[in-house]
Image (spheres, grey):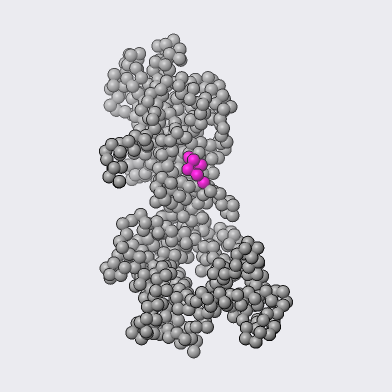
Amino acid sequence: MSGDTNTLEALSEEYRASIPTDLRTARTFQWYLDELREEPAIARNAHQRVADMFDFYGSDYDEETGVVEYHLASEDPLGEGENTFYGREIHEAIHEFVNKAKSGARGLGPERRIKLLLGPVGSGKSDFDRQVRRYFEDYTMREDGRMYTFRWTNLADVIADQDPSDDVVRSPMNQDPLVLLPLDQRKRVVEELNERLDAPYTIQNEQSLDPASEFYMDSLLGYYDDDLQQVLENHVEVIRLTADENKRQAIETFEPKDKKNQDETELTGDVNYSKIAVYGESDPRAFDYSGAFCNANRGIFSGEELLKLQREFLYDFLHATQEMTIKPKSNPRMDIDQVIVGRTNMPEYKEKKGDEKMEAFNDRTKRIDFPYVLQYDEEANIYRKMLANADVPDIHVEPHTLEMAGLFGVLTRIEEPDSGTVDLLQKAKAYNGEIDEAEDVDVKKLREEATGTAEIGEGMEGVSPRFIGDEISEAIMDSMHRERGFLSPLTTFNHLEGNLENHGSIAEDLFDTYYRYLELVREEYRERAIEDVRHALAYDLDEIQRQGEKYMDHVMAYIDDDTVEDELTGREQGPDETFLRSVEEKLDVPEDRKDDFRQEVSNWVSRRAREGDTFNPQDNDRLRRALERKLWEDKKHNINFSALVSSGEMDDEERSAWIDALIEQGYTRGGAKEVLEFAGAEVAKTELEDE
């Protein structure tokens, strides 16, 4: 079937369907006026179009955080999820960026500022900037995002010295056709459009024609005795404008060059030397509108590593932002309409921030922090995306591998808590949403505390996802060379530890701290590995159900100050406090919090009963974990943990059953053997220490 869809005819039809039907159609200026009356939003400015673009692809509002997650980033509908962004911090940054664009759309000030994406290397700011440009291209190809420009025609028929090769000249700045109307007449048209416009902003356009178009307009008006209608009908065609980064059309990316080779004409354009001999040096027709600001007009200007530019070079941004104009050499000033986005890393920002001579430039920037992700489950999704987008060999990633790698990354990024109520690992877990209701952990307070202690912001320093991703890749190749069909946390830890000092972006004075963090992660993995093995060795659904029912009977008797029937004698007796505490202590519920926990579980059971659901401890994560751990304590004394380390010391059938139980949890057979031996050795060591 796929062969039928991949014929030249089918591919051609699919391509044609993706192209706007009027992409190559020339229209009259009158048609454009009529079209604007039907759809005034066509005449939006760049900020308004970019703001609408984010809403066009959909969004979700998180009431808890007050953050809008835009599908452009959270789902990537164009890429079928290939370029999604993860982490609360990243979506907060994107939410802030869109708010700046929407404020600019309303003329509240950000339209006259650089949106400066600030963050450490590998935080996602470049990927997001690229995503915005990619979606802007797509949006302008759609009906909702369409925009138009114009071209001059039949110029050589009227203008005596016009080069015949310039008989048709496209608007050099891709300006909106509305700028062809004199300002007084244009204002009346715009006023009418705003009466019809259904949007949270108003259309405004007080731009002047670019110098070349101004020259053509003056010449043609002189020829037609100031009959504007004749000029527009005989010499202007309205054409569809779509953003195209490769063509440098309504999207421009600008990269800093060597300081000695920087030239402001790269931004503002330069003389077209091939036309000087035809028109003369001072003629606006002899100007080359190829500067980055010219190319970005009507769309997005993206400045990579913006603050690496020389101070003098950055002055060109002052007029571009505050006045929305540029002043090239040998040419009059030109109005521009574009969203100016800059990206920079921390060292350059700190240097420019402390430079008093950069005060005017800094005042014209709106900083948007792009920190590292601080939730290790979300960080794991970044690595998962990396693997999904690569040609990964036939290798299985074992449970906890990516999460523990992410946990190490997060530990290097978050501020050490100074409140004394939680340690660094507990804070990372709290940020990850692993907070029991009974625990007195205020995540909001932790974030506020970190804001006060971090130099710029929490998550703006630490190990980048690129470093960890590189080590995961190396660990995969190492596993392949050793003919292991799985990647485990232990292999990943070895690569992280072995290459920590070889990474150029990690300062030497941080090595000992990061090794300590790795030990914290190893200890966390140890607990999780033991938990998995515990689940495999001692898991008994029927026994957990029975123990759960017993626990709830005694809890209800405790709350109601009632009695419960003894299982052996059948006699009524008070609730068994020893049994209740033996369950609760497995969750580290202290004596003074036991009433809160019991009431919490009781409320959960009552709520389910009202909804018609039967009691099942598997549906309550905290209660299930407590019962599993108690069952483990009851059974572990009958298990020879030392024998787990060597398959020769244990009955193969029993060991195979445990491995099968681990496979059900997501392990491969080889990974199950490794975690069984690792956890067995750890528990055996603990048992010996306790004797």
Question: Residue 176: horizontal and vertical position, in percent?
Answer: 45, 27
Q: Does the magenta run of residues contain 432?
A: no
Q: How many marks?
A: 0
Q: Which residues are magenta?
A: 53-59
**As displayed, is residue 616 above or below residue 139?**
below
* Residue 57 magenta-highlighted: yes
Residue situated in front as seen by the camera: 57 or 250: 57
Q: Residue at x 54, y 40 (%)?
A: 102
The furthest residue to the front: 570
Q: Quadrant of residue 609?
A: bottom right
Q: Name which residue lies at 40% across and 49% down.
A: 80
Is residue 332 shown to the viewer in this render?
A: no
Looking at the image, residue 127 lies above or below residue 532: above
At horizontal 33% and vertical 64% (from top left) the residue drawn is 395
Residue 423 placement, left or right of 533:
right
Q: Residue at x 36, y 19 (%)?
A: 153
Q: Nearer the viewer, residue 204 or 59?
A: 59
| Relative horizontal placement of residue 569, taking residue 266 as reference (left or right) | right
Q: Residue furthest bottom?
A: 691
Position above or below: 85 against 514: above
Residue farthest toward the right in the current orientation of the protein: 561
Towards the viewer: 335 or 534:
534
- Residue 288 appearing in the image: yes
Q: Position of residue 82 (x, y in %)?
A: 39, 51
Residue 10: % across, % down? 30, 38
The x, y position of residue 494, in whole percent, is: 36, 71
